[in-house]
Image (tube, rainbow, N blue to C red):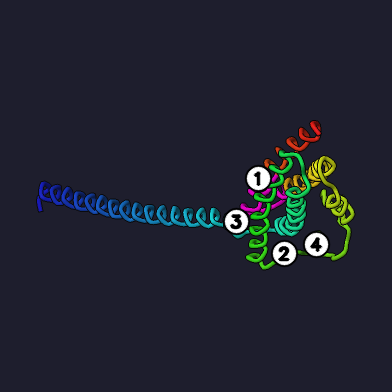
């Protein structure tokens, strides 16, 4: 074999080896790229599932806690007494503003009573519990969250005309302030979205009615 022939064979061998290295490298890069895409896809998929699970958690309309239950159980008898007082205005009040406001109180609070009872039923809780003011029959609840005592209610029933108007306004102011305090507690500590919304409506609506009653008292 001549020196020239040996040189040609050497170059061919090196070219084949180089080509093999390049091909092997390309295969490795392709494999790595595929693995990277798969891992990336898996990672994104897991993240999305976790985010969805986290978003869904605690965002159920039926979620509630002890504060929600206490709010409903206490506000039901509180509203019921306000409605009872409001109904007296028709035959006892003489002031047109008192009669008008009493009608609005009845229209607003009666449906809320039904709504709160439906919440408690759906939560599997009694409409009156340990926190409810009606849990102890015969107990005088005067001054508890603005609730009137049995004596107070009997006195109001005995009043007519301007005397009734004044007593009604004074009692309802105290009653509303009690409800507002309870509602603010629910806003702070409650969990159920519907209950907290109602609490906000009570704070807003009854605060406005307190101002109106104070104005009426100043005119009587």
Q: Quadrant of residue 210?
A: top right
SS class of the residue under badge 2? loop
Say whether disc 1 or disc 4 marks the residue closer to the N-terminus: 4
Q: Is residue 57 above or below residue 4?
A: below
Q: What segment is highlighted magenta in the picture?
A: 186-202
Residue 30 picture location, percent across and down: 30, 53
Say whether disc 4 or disc 3 marks the residue closer to the N-terminus: 3
Depth order, front residue of 104/21: 104
Magenta segment includes 1: no
Inter-mark Cα distance, 1 to 3 = 23 Å
Residue, disc 1: 201
Q: Residue at the spot x=75%, y=39% of the render?
A: 95
For disc 1, the neighbor class at 10 Å (few under 14, some 14 to 19, many from 20) is some
Inter-mark Cα distance, 4 to 3 = 31 Å
Is residue 165 toward the left or the right of residue 21 in the image?
right
Dot in front, 1 or 3: 1
Residue 120 picture location, percent across and down: 67, 63
Say whether disc 2 or disc 1 marks the residue closer to the N-terminus: 2
Inter-mark Cα distance, 2 to 1 = 21 Å
Residue, disc 2: 127
Residue, disc 3: 58
SS class of the residue under badge 1? helix
Residue 67 picture location, percent across and down: 73, 55
SS class of the residue under badge 3? loop
For disc 3, the neighbor class at 10 Å (few under 14, some 14 to 19, many from 20) is few
């Amino acid at each position: 074999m001549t020196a020239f022939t040996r040189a040609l064979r050497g170059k061919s061998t090196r070219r084949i080896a180089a080509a093999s290295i390049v091909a092997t490298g390309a295969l490795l890069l392709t494999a790595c790229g595929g693995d990277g895409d798969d891992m990336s896809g898996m990672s994104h998929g897991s993240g999305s599932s976790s985010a969805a699970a986290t978003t869904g958690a605690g965002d159920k309309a039926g979620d509630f806690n002890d504060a929600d239950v206490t709010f409903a159980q206490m506000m039901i008898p509180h509203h019921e007494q306000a409605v009872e007082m409001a109904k007296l205005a028709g035959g006892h009040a003489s002031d047109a503003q008192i009669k008008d406001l009493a009608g609005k109180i009845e229209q607003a609070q009666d449906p809320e009573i039904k709504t709160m009872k439906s919440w408690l039923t759906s939560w599997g809780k009694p409409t009156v519990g340990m926190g409810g003011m009606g849990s102890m029959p015969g107990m005088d609840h005067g001054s508890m969250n603005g609730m009137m005592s049995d004596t107070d209610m009997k006195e109001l029933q005995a009043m007519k005309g301007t005397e009734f108007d004044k007593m009604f306004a004074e009692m309802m102011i105290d009653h509303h302030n009690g409800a507002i305090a309870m509602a603010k507690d629910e806003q702070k500590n409650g969990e159920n979205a519907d209950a907290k919304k109602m609490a906000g409506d009570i704070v807003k609506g009854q605060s406005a009615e307190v101002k109106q009653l104070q104005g009426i008292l100043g005119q009587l």
